[in-house]
Amino acid sequence: MSKALNTLNFLGILVLAGLCVFQWQVNRRLNLQAIEQEKHLLQLQQQNRDLEKMIEGQKSDLQTVKDQFMKSHEELAEIRKTKSVLERNILELETERDQLKSSIADWSEAINKRDEQIRSANDQLTRLASERNDSVLKYNSLAEKYNSLVEDFNKANAQLSKIAGQTNKPQNSPN
């Protein structure tokens, strides 16, 4: 029995050693899994921190975008107001331009009429100057004829006086 007990003891020790090896492998595998999970947990925590930083950055970016959007919206409102004012100014300028075109057309027509009147007056002045020159020439011709007639008259009068003077002279008798 002692041998059987020894054998049983030895078998118990072998079973116990096998059980220890089995337990050790299970514990080792569990430890490796725990280590892997802890590494994974650390990675997830790091990713979480990175994501939180990224979220904070994105929140900041979002705020910047919101601010820029509001600024753009305000600028757009100002641009629309300015556009409205400019459109009114354009309409006023177009109206003014149309009035000026009309005035220019009226002035152009008036200038054309004035030029026509000036041409007509110039033609009339030219005609009158020509008539005056003709009248002066006729007057000069008449004056020459008058002067010639006066000269002829004076010559005739002198001859008449000479003839009359010879007839009025006392005649001396011949004795």
Image (tube, rainbow, N blue to C red):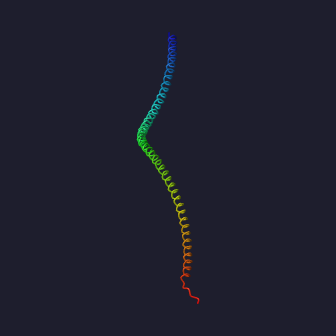
Q: Is residue 56 above or below residue 136?
A: above
Q: Is residue 73 above or below residue 147?
A: above
Q: Is residue 2 above or below residue 116?
A: above
Measuring from the top left, give residue 86's x and y in whole percent.
Answer: 43, 43
Measuring from the top left, give residue 166's x and y in whole percent.
Answer: 56, 82
Q: Nearer the viewer, residue 84 or 137?
A: 137
Q: Residue furthest right?
A: 174
Q: Nearer the viewer, residue 162 or 69?
A: 162
Q: Residue drawn at (55%, 77%), measured in percent from left and top? A: 160
Q: Residue furthest top?
A: 1
Q: Residue furthest bottom?
A: 175
Count of labels shown? 0
Q: Residue drawn at (57%, 88%), measured in percent from left and top? A: 173
Quadrant (top left, top right, bottom left, bottom right) of the C terminus:
bottom right
Within the image, what quadrant is residue 150 found in? bottom right
Q: Residue drawn at (51%, 57%), measured in percent from left and top? A: 124
Q: Is residue 50 above or below residue 120?
A: above
Q: Is residue 152 left or right of residue 49?
A: right
Within the image, what quadrant is residue 82 found in? top left
Q: Residue furthest front?
A: 175
Measuring from the top left, give residue 141's x and y in whole percent.
Answer: 56, 67
Measuring from the top left, give residue 44's x and y in whole percent.
Answer: 47, 29
Q: Nearer the viewer, residue 73 or 45?
A: 73
